[in-house]
Image (cartoon, helix red, strand yellow):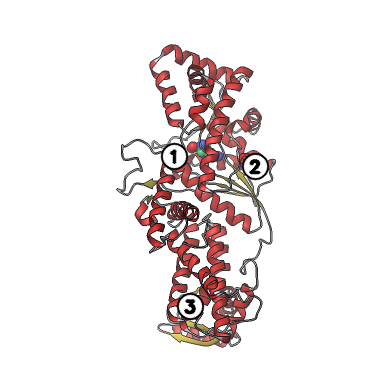
């Protein structure tokens, strides 16, 4: 499959190499004055101490572009402007239009990739960090699966640790049936806070809780049964949130902390045998190099606590070891908020020191910032309490319903409900994915649900409108009918944007910068709108009609694919 930008880059790169005597990046990008602009001659001229225009001219002497370009010009201080021949555009468009995958190749070396995401905690409400992790992780899963990798979804549920003593004792006080009820309807915070209140207020309860932790860690069957109730009911609630969010996580994807219990002691033994453990204040610790606290003292990663218990860090060490040794992962993504970056880097370094993690296997912290309220402060409910995730999603869907009624009052009730869901949830996801994930962003219903601007509803509407062209015109997409004719400037802009999809996709799969995919889709929808304003489709005929329908069809398929990769549903009408 031909990728225009790659093709031009290859041709120019060899000319640059001939002129420079060594490989040089021609640095090609979409141009303002021509289809593509090559800036490399400027950099090279500086290095050679020569006049840039002269270097550009010499490069052009060494390159053959006439089969691809209709015009090649040196402009300004020494840019090379490239205009692609329209026959070439047509031929390339036909190639991707006839391809189910829109010109995007399957990975030539498919990998086993673990995506660690969502990771809520038993008997605790999911917070907005878990929401972001779930949305971003789902996009990563979709992108990598579509690229042909074996993707292992791992939901690292917090289901172990000292707080389970108090949670189990509280469960006993409330009664099993009542507790299960509270948890399954999603009153996780209520349950957790009540347990904590009892723990803080009542010494006898505190004492029972401590003994309960010991019993749990010793595998006492009666205690395990109670613990299991907490976990099962919480999972039910999380599954309900995932269903509402329409993400690919399933019941089978829970690889909870407790899953690694049997591997904790072996990990400790292995680290000891490698000489990586040191005792510090009674605890068994690793001190990975390069991690220090504010005073410059080495930071410990606590593997086994002074009381003999294993914690979050030990579990993460067992987890990464398991992923490499048992699952055979060669790429691991940790979709976890930025505050845990220090912890994760220490885990990764320790895994390298223990030689579990070695080239070509790689691990990435896919970090992200916080969600802020419209006021720029931490997101809270109006009453100031911390937020319940489902309420946030329900409100988005309710507000979306209002937008849709205003747009098309004739939709029947059932369709409207389905569209409201797609638009409301889509808006929440898109608002998250459309900004650089490392940044914080403001959660603003009005902005995310706006039909103008870089939003999900704008893209969903653009797609629905293209689909309606085919519906209204009673025409089918002219697939497999040969190259379209690209004549008008707006057609050319749209064609170039469509041809950029394969290259863009690859960049997103590597960098996991989903905002670049969002931005691409926004520009595609904008290019389509300009095309549609300038070039009548159904009112044209013959070759022009066929060509424009190909552009419409390819735009619709690219938008639909892009939205699907971001986990966003695209209703047929809006
Ligand atoms: N349960 C954790 C939390 O709520 C997130 C788990 C992230 N994954 C991991 N392997 N540590 O913070």
Q: Secondary structure at mark 1?
A: loop
Q: Which numbered mark, 2 or 1, is in the foreground of this view?
A: 1
Q: Is mark 1 within 8 Å of ligand 1?
A: yes
- Classify residue 405 as left or right of residue 358: left
Picture coordinates of residue 550 (x, y %)? 57, 76
Q: Which numbered mark, 2 or 3, is in the foreground of this view?
A: 3
Residue with the mark numbered 2: 323
Residue with the mark numbered 3: 493
Q: Is residue 319 visible?
A: yes
Residue 259 in the image: above or below residue 108: above
| Rendered image: mark on residue 451 | none
Q: Secondary structure at mark 3?
A: helix
CB under 8 Å between discs 2 and 1: no
Using a 10 Å C-alpha cutoff, classify the residue at mark 2 as few (fewer than 14 neighbours), some (14 to 19) or many (20 or more): many
Identify which residue is drawn at 37% across, 52% down: 445
Residue 99 in the image: above or below residue 215: below
* Front residue of this view, candidates 379 and 350: 379
Picture coordinates of residue 432 (x, y %)? 44, 52
Q: CA distance from mark 2 to mark 3?
A: 45 Å
Residue 471 in the image: above or below residue 273: below
Identify which residue is drawn at 45% across, 14% down: 205
Picture coordinates of residue 488 (x, y %)? 48, 84
Q: CA distance from mark 1 to mark 3?
A: 42 Å
Q: Secondary structure at mark 2?
A: helix
CB under 8 Å between discs 1 and 3: no
Using a 10 Å C-alpha cutoff, classify the residue at mark 1 as few (fewer than 14 neighbours), some (14 to 19) or many (20 or more): some
Q: CA distance from mark 2 to mark 1?
A: 26 Å
* Front residue of this view, candidates 520 and 356: 520
| Rendered image: mark on residue 127 | 1
Using a 10 Å C-alpha cutoff, classify the residue at mark 3 as few (fewer than 14 neighbours), some (14 to 19) or many (20 or more): some
């Amino acid at each position: 499959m031909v990728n225009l930008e790659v093709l031009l880059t290859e041709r120019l790169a060899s000319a640059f190499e001939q002129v420079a005597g060594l490989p040089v990046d021609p640095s090609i990008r979409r141009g303002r004055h021509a289809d593509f602009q090559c800036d490399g001659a400027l950099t090279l001229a500086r290095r050679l101490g020569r006049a840039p225009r002269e270097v550009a001219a010499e490069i052009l002497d060494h390159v053959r572009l006439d089969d691809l370009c209709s015009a090649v010009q040196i402009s300004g201080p020494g840019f090379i402007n490239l205009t692609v021949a329209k026959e070439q555009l047509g031929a390339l468009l036909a190639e991707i239009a006839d391809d189910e995958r829109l010109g995007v190749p399957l990975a030539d070396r498919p990998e086993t990739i673990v995506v660690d995401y969502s990771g809520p905690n038993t008997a605790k409400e999911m917070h907005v960090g878990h929401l972001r992790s779930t949305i971003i992780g789902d996009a990563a899963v979709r992108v990598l699966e579509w690229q042909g990798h074996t993707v292992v979804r791992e939901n690292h549920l917090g289901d172990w640790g000292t707080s389970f003593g108090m949670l189990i004792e509280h469960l006993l006080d409330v009664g099993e049936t009542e507790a299960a009820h509270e948890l399954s309807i999603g009153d996780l915070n209520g349950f957790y806070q009540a347990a904590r209140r009892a723990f803080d207020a009542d010494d006898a309860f505190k004492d029972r809780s401590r003994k309960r932790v010991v019993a749990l860690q010793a595998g006492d069957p009666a205690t395990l049964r109670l613990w299991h109730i907490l976990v099962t009911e919480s999972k039910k609630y999380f599954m309900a949130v995932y269903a509402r969010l329409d993400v690919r996580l399933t019941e089978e994807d829970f690889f909870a902390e407790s899953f690694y219990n049997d591997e904790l002691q072996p990990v400790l033994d292995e680290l000891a045998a490698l000489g990586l453990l040191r005792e510090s204040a009674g605890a068994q610790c690793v001190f990975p190099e390069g991690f220090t606290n504010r005073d410059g003292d080495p930071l410990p990663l606590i593997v086994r606590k002074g009381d003999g218990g294993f914690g979050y860090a030990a579990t993460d060490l067992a987890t990464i070891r398991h992923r490499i040794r048992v699952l055979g992962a060669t790429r691991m993504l940790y979709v976890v908020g930025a505050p845990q970056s220090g912890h994760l880097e220490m885990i990764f370094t320790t895994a390298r020191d223990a030689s579990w993690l070695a080239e070509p296997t790689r691990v990435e912290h896919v970090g992200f910032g916080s969600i802020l309220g419209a006021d720029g402060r931490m997101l809270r409910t109006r009453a100031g309490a911390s937020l319940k995730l489902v309420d946030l999603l329900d409100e988005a869907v309710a507000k979306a319903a209002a937008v849709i009624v205003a747009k098309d009052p004739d939709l029947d009730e059932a369709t409207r409900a389905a569209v409201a869901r797609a638009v409301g949830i889509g808006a929440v996801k898109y608002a998250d994915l459309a900004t650089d994930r490392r940044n914080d962003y403001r959660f603003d219903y009005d902005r995310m649900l706006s039909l103008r601007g870089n939003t999900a509803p704008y893209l969903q509407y653009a797609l629905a409108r293209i689909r309606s062209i085919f519906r209204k015109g009673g025409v089918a997409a002219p697939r497999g009918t040969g190259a379209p004719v690209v004549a008008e400037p707006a057609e050319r802009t749209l064609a170039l944007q469509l041809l950029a999809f394969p290259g863009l996709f690859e960049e997103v799969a590597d960098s996991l910068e989903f905002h670049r995919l969002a931005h691409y889709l926004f520009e595609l929808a904008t290019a389509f709108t300009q095309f549609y304003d300038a070039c009548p489709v159904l009112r044209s005929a013959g070759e022009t009609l066929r060509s424009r329908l190909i552009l419409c069809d390819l735009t619709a398929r690219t938008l639909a694919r892009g939205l699907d990769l971001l986990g966003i549903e695209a209703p047929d009408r809006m």
